[in-house]
Image (cartoon, rainbow, N blue to C red):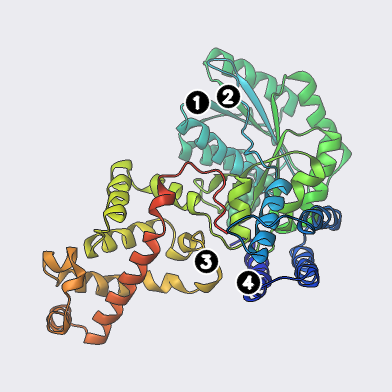
Amino acid sequence: MAFESLTDKLQNVFKNLRKKGRLTEADVKAALKEVKMALLEADVSFKVVKQFMKSVQERAVGADVMSGLNPGQMVIKIVNEELVNLMGSETAELLLKPGSEITVIMMVGLQGAGKTTTTAKLAGKLKSKGRKPLLAACDVYRPAAITQLQVNGEKQGVEVFSMGDKQNPVNIAKAAYEHAKKEKFNVLILDTAGRLHIDEDMMKELADIKEALEVDQTVLVVDAMTGQDAVNVAETFGEKVGIDGVVLTKLDGDARGGAALSIRAITGKPILFVGMGEKLSDLEQFYPDRMASRILGMGDVMSLIEKAQANLDEEKAKEMEQKFRKNSFGFDDYLESMNQMKNMGGLSSVLNMIPGMGSQIKDIDSMVDEKDMARKEAMILSMTPRERSHPEILNPSRKARIAKGAGVDMAEVNRLVKQFEQAKKMMKQMPGLMGGKGGKRGKF
Ligand code: GDP
């Protein structure tokens, strides 16, 4: 998960602040110095860190402490707000033309950044929003790029326009546009060729496509794992080709997260989406406020809920929410939620998004490993329906019966009950947030 070490460090800084009753200016200074080191270690651009610290310091020194907050919380609040500013306080959307007009999106980026994969991911996203996208295979240099796009396009149920690798990309783009017009597609996504490094030929080719076709959105795909290089690439593409937004891929594998924090400030262009894995569904909208909460270890409850809801049907989500509200979450629900979390790609990825859970739970996936799940299921199924819906009635003799029924020892039943209580407690923090509409959820 991105930002792990940054989050750990920042949490430490803030934990030390919280311990103090009253903060002196020196305390704040020392804390901010540590924040600065943490950001630099996370590979955030030096220029950005400098500007960031300046804004935070200006606000922190002489800030009126708001009622209900202690000075330490105030510092966290300011750092959070400045992190949001850094990443572009508004959530940026891909601009699409209305109705049947064709929006042309040109995907650009270096080889290996994840451009072809992201193109297919984006097509799937647009399709699920009711758009009719056409993909055009304009990468005629990289062996297998065309086939890769065709395979992924097919998986997404999206048509891919190709003219093989003997035509030049400008002609392919123009022909694809004509095809889109004739067949009434309303989004045309051009998968252009990347190179290993920025070179003049690539830039010229992209400029030529832009000349030949009215490109509405130029989207740059960069690899988060390359850190500052990604930022430099974005800066150059911005200057030479002109870009409207960025997709930051492989954020799932980038433990530092510096690129995510620097790109907006350096290029002035927003991050539109982040790639969170190799699967075609692993493309998420980028929300600066949620990302800031995640970095600070506040978790990202809204993303969690959305992720859950995309996997659950809506009815189920509502039902579950009602249960949290009425506090009638029982063992049946627990079992169901464990199964759902498993479907969501592991409990740890989900728990990581919950405030305060972040760094503490690293090996949690073992909690839902197959064998363990089977044993838990056996224990829950050995309970009577009443025990499942009213766990408070579980006394030692009932637990002994359950242990016997499931073929486990009593300690394991106790462990299950404890884990259930923990899960319930955790879920209980969520109802107020589940009904919320996003936006700022500073809980300092
Ligand atoms: P291109 O040369 O820019 O078109 O890059 P590809 O689309 O072929 O992607 C290069 C590699 O990165 C492939 O193995 C992809 O599966 C992988 N990849 C792309 N996006 C992501 C992502 O968000 N996370 C992870 N972990 N891998 C990704």
Identify the mark nearer the N-term, 1 or 2.
1
Identify the mark nearer the N-term, 3 or 2.
2
Which residue is under mark 1?
Answer: 131
How far separated are the C-alphas under marks 3 and 2?
41 Å
Amino acid at pointer 1? Arg
Identify the mark nearer the N-term, 4 or 2.
4
Q: Work out which quarter of the rendered image holds the N terminus and state it.
A: bottom right
How far separated are the C-alphas under marks 1 and 3?
38 Å
Q: Residue furthest top?
A: 182
Q: Residue at x 22, y 86 (%)?
A: 410
Identify the mark nearer the N-term, 3 or 4.
4
Q: Is residue 16 left or right of residue 404?
A: right
Q: Work out which quarter of the rendered image holds the C terminus and state it.
A: bottom right
Q: Which residue is drawn at 71% across and 30% down?
A: 166
Q: Is residue 214 left or right of residue 372?
A: right
Q: Which residue is drawn at 55% across and 13% down?
A: 182
Which residue is under mark 3?
Answer: 356
**Label 4 neighbour load within 10 Å: few <14, some 14-19, many 20+:** some
Amino acid at pointer 3? Gly
Give the SS element for disc 2: strand
Circle on res. 18: 4
Viewer-proximal residue, 349 or 196? 349
**Label 2 neighbour load within 10 Å: few <14, some 14-19, many 20+:** many
How far separated are the C-alphas under marks 1 and 2?
7 Å
Circles 4 and 1 in contact, beta carbons < 8 Å: no
Q: Is mark 2 within 8 Å of ligand 1?
A: no
